[in-house]
Amino acid sequence: MIDPLQLDLLATHYNYYAVVLLLGIGLYMLVESPNLVKKVIGMNIFQTGIFLFFITLAYRAGANPPVVEEGAGPYVSPLPHVLILTAIVVGVSLTAVALALIIRIYSEYGTLDEDTLKQLYYD
């Protein structure tokens, strides 16, 4: 029998389900797709799941923004948000470099299929 407290935790922490779903979809696309562009899209979906996870961990119920005021209660730490902003910038630049390399690969070999590229490289 499921305890009502456990049932309440399952119903209120739906953001963790979104994290697991995003990580699963992204990882599946990275592993199973032979197309290089789809792999980059899967990497971005995986990154989004990680971003959501860190932002979820930074949440504190009843906390105030990190602006120091007289008599204010507990504060939210700005560090996870700053780290995620930095990670977003790094992710966008990584995506841009990956897509530039994919364009170069396509112009050189005429395909984006990973298996075909392996055959061309090893033959």
Image: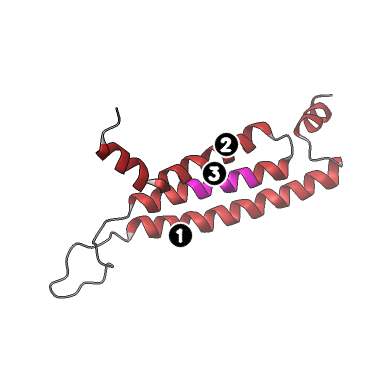
Between discs 2 and 3, the one toward the N terminus? 2
| Disc 2 residue type (three-letter) | Leu
Depth-wise, is mark 3 or mark 1 nearer the camera? Answer: 3
Q: Which residues are magenta?
A: 41-49
Image spot of residue 87 (x, y percent):
48, 54
Residue under pointer 2: 27
Q: Is residue 63 above or below residue 115?
A: below
Residue under pointer 1: 85
Coloring scheme used: secondary structure
Could you say whether the residue bearing mark 1 is in a helix, strand or loop?
helix
Between discs 2 and 1, the one toward the N terminus? 2
Could you say whether the residue bearing mark 3 is in a helix, strand or loop?
helix
In the rendered structure, the answer to whether residue 6 lies left or right of residue 15 reads left
Q: Could you tell me what secondary structure mostly forms the magenta stretch?
A: helix
Residue under pointer 3: 46
Between discs 3 and 1, the one toward the N terminus? 3
**Residue in the picture at 82% in, 45% down:** 106
Image spot of residue 120 (x, y percent):
83, 30
Where, quadrant-wise, is the C terminus in this rendering?
Answer: top right
